[in-house]
Image: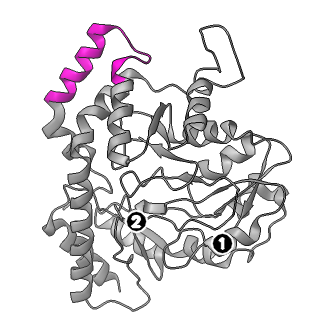
Amino acid sequence: MEIPLVDLRAELAPLRADIDTAIAKVLDSVRFIGGVEVTSLESEIAEVCQVDHCIGVSSGTDALLVSLMALNVGPGDEVVTTPFSFFATAGVVARLGATPVFADIEPDSFNMDPMAAAAACTDKTRAVMPVHLYGRRAPMPDVGDVPVLEDAAQAIGTGTTEGIAAGLSFFPTKNLGAFGDGGAVLSNDQEFADRVRLMRNHGARPKYYHAMVGGNFRLDSLQAAILRVKLPHLKGWSEQRRRNADRYRALFADASLPTELILPDDTPEHIYNQFVIRAPKRDELRQHLRDANIGSEIYYPRPFHLQECFANLGYEPGAFPHAEKAADEVLALPIYPALTEQQQAYVVDTIADFY
């Protein structure tokens, strides 16, 4: 049996005809930037995510970048965030000349500890950026008037936006994935949303008249059209991921496994973009799974404060012990909606054989 970490073919097959029609419609219109596909997708996602404004952008990374730009984050500013996430979370801060300041994670959820985040704030803090990692909502820190920007790249549909904004990613392996890069900014703040709309198109309004310096952060019409076909299926796909997670828990409970192997908690609104376990002898287990043709992945093997590009920040090993321990232990197993009970049983049996 061969089980990939993600099976995009299984997701695409029943939608292929509708997607082909949607792509043909855009090709016939020759409107490849902006237009009705983008504006319609924005309205539909805003309704699904229960927010007032959705602004389509070119990637999840750019959703965070343009949001920080709209908050005027720049040199001399600090942004408090987690050391344990996809690189874009901290990378966008550094790209603007600001300083990422890290707060350790909660060991059970892998999300940033809200009390640690609040304690890390200074008079230089321009924003705080929690990450809803693996599809599980992070608690919002109590940081007073400091804007909170949520990195929700892995967490579409887990609840409404609580901060000034949230950034989504439509990378192909997300619960709602495009056929390339894409993203969106969600917000309930009219003024902030207007700034993001202006900045995603070089700050131009009208064309060639620039009120501010922005960037080229536009979402392609082809990607928007594809996402519109897939969006009505998002709720069902996320529910199936939750059912698969429940099945994993039942299968693991029936297997003879070490207590050190820890499964993700069963929490409301978790959409399981990833099903991440803590595993003793993680690297050896991953090779065992690979030998059995089972896909897995390490999200993420090195926390930000130990990355070479952030050596100038002065953090030493041991600065954030929960993040460092997670980096040594986490392993993502297949959780995609089309995963069958037989496949999941094979995954669990293979892990049981290892231990």
Quarter of image, res 272:
bottom left
| Numbered label attached to residue 104 | 1
Quarter of image, res 261:
bottom left
Q: Position of residue 204 (x, y in %)?
A: 63, 15
Residue at the image position 27 percent from the left and 91 percent from the top: 256
First in sequence: mark 1 vs mark 2:
1
> In the rendered view of the protein, which quadrant contains the C terminus?
bottom left
The region drawn magenta spans: 17-37
The three-letter code of the residue at mark 1 reads: Asp
Q: Is residue 123 left or right of residue 57?
A: right
Q: Quick one: SS at disc 1?
A: loop
Q: Closer to the camera, 159 or 327? A: 159
* Viewer can see residue 327: yes
Q: Is residue 237 left or right of residue 56?
A: left
Find disc 2 in the rendering and name its residue. Answer: 332
Q: Is residue 32 magenta?
A: yes
Q: Is residue 171 above or below residue 347?
A: above
Q: Position of residue 90 (x, y in %)?
A: 67, 52
Q: Main SS type for the magenta part?
A: helix
* Viewer can see residue 179: no
Residue at the image position 59 percent from the left and 43 percent from the top: 64
Q: Which colour assignment does the render follow?
A: one colour
| Real-space Cα separation, disc 1 to disc 2, in angstroms | 21 Å
Nearer the observer, disc 1 or disc 2?
1
Q: Quick one: SS at disc 2?
A: strand
Q: Label 1 crowding class (10 Å Cα cut-off): few <14, some 14-19, many 20+?
A: many
